[in-house]
Each structure stands twice: as structure tokens, then as C-alpha cells.
Amino acid sequence: MTTWLIHRITGLFMIVLFGIKFSTAFFLLREDKPQQAIFLHRHPVIDITLIFLFCLHSSFGLKTIIYELGFRREKLLVRLATAVALILSVVGTVIYLRTA
């Protein structure tokens, strides 16, 4: 039940943050670029949050698919999905910070 709720909440937050990224990208195409759009589009907290949310959402989604296919050890799947999400989030954040 908890993983279902986390999966839904991360999906909603990803929709909001991707909406911010896409809408500010349209402002960056203009010649007079507003400072707020530049600030929001290039803010590292938004990018790192998106990395974390994407890893968590995708690993819990895969957990749900594996569970629905018949693997009934849900506690193991939750722990494995959480560990994979955290490892991928840390690796993605380190790669992002090195290239930024």
C-alpha cells in the first residue's frame, strides 16, 4: 500500500517539475530571456529532484510489474526497489554534479 502511494505521489511531482522545465524552455527561445525562466530552468535542485523522483518512480513501477507477474515476496521487492532507486539516484546525482 505504501509503495503504491509513493509511486503515485512521485508521478504527480514529476509531472509538475517536467511542466516547469518545459514551460521555462519555451521562454529561453526568445531573444529577451526572462531571468526567472533562466533561474528555474537551470536550477540544480529541480534537476536533482527529477533524477531522484525518476529513479524512485521507475523502480517502484518495475516492482509492481514483477509482483503482478507472480513473484509474491513483496517485502523483498520493496527493499530491492528502494535500494536500486537510491543507488541510481546517487550515481545520477554524482554524474550530474560532475558535468554541471
Image: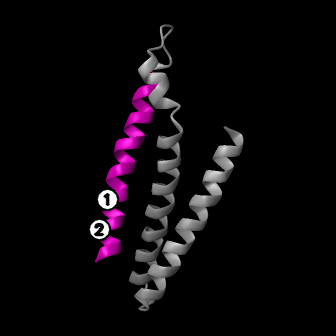
The image quarter in which residue 23 lies: top left
In magenta, the rendered stretch is 1-26
For the point 51% across and 34% down, the residue is: 43
Rendered position, 47 above or below 81: above
The amino acid marked with disc number 2 is: Leu
Residue sitting farthest toward the right = 98
Residue named by callout 1: 9
| Displayed quadrant of residue 63 | bottom left
**Could you say which is closer to the camera, residue 72 or residue 36?**
36
Q: Amino acid at mark 1?
A: Ile
Horizontal and vertical percent position of residue 87: 60, 67
Residue highlighted by disc 2: 5
Please, which colouring scheme is shown?
one colour
Q: Residues within 10 Å of mark 2 (few under 14, many from 20)?
A: few
- Relative height, residue 56 to residue 26 (above, below): below
Per the image, label 2 sits on a secondary structure element best described as: helix
Question: Is the Cβ of the residue at disc 2 closer than 8 Å to that at disc 1?
Answer: yes
Q: Position of residue 12 (x, y in %)?
A: 32, 52
Query: What main secondary structure does the magenta stretch of the protein show?
Result: helix
Q: How many numbered dots are placed on residues in this image?
A: 2
Which residue is at the front of the view, 87 or 24? 87
In three-dimensional space, the C-alpha distance between marks 2 and 1, rounded to whole angstroms, equals 6 Å
Residue ID at (46%, 17%): 35
